Amino acid sequence: MDDRGMTILIDGACPLCRWEGGVLARLDRGRGRLRIVDIAAEGFDAGAYGLTQDGVMGSIHGVTAGGEVVTGMEVFRRAYGAVGWGWLWAPTGWPLLRPMFDVLYRWFARNRLRLTGRGGECAGGRCGVSRQPGAGEAGPGGAGSGGAAR
């Protein structure tokens, strides 16, 4: 699959997420294969991607040039693949390891705000993250369009 033109929606208010977005931007080296969009920026409109603000806060999202929405670890697999570093992330997609990496990512997503000192931002269940194995990993209109795993 060609991931050129993939848009990655990151939480720029999360230090680790912001760092990861910066790494991806540097690896892209201005080639335009990735577009990093800060969901915490004033004026960001999740609806422009057919998503909700709570959904994108609960999970990292990527939107391919063809309009496919992917979430969670699949975003990283595709993004690093697009910039020539797919080999580094390949083990996270291997059949025996994929479930473990996906679960670890969902744990991080559920705890990201608390871990970065912003625990009150998702009070009352906002930014909910699915605990279902594999939920929100890929697909338009699937878990990625609501409140899935980041």
Image: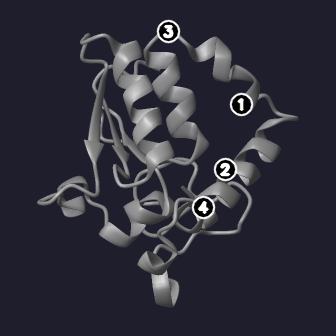
Residue at numbered disc 4: 115
Who comes first in sequence, dot 1 or dot 3? 3
Q: Give me the C-alpha separation between circle 2 and circle 4.
A: 13 Å
Q: Give me the C-alpha separation between circle 4 and circle 3.
A: 30 Å
Q: Where is residue 47? Give x, y as percent.
A: 21, 63
Which of discs 4 and 3 lies nearer the camera? The answer is 4
Image vertical order of residue 136 relative to residue 29, above or below: below
Residue at numbered disc 1: 93
- Mark 4 and mark 3 residues within 8 Å of each other at the beta carbon: no
Tell me the amino acid under the disc marked 4: Leu
> Label 3: how many residues lie within 10 Å, few (<14), some (14-19) or many (20+)?
few
Q: Secondary structure at mark 4?
A: helix
Q: Where is residue 16? Give x, y as percent.
A: 50, 44
Tell me the amino acid under the disc marked 1: Gly
Q: Where is residue 107? Give x, y as percent.
A: 70, 59
Who comes first in sequence, dot 2 or dot 3? 3
Q: Secondary structure at mark 2?
A: helix
Q: Is residue 126 visible?
A: no
Residue at numbered disc 2: 105
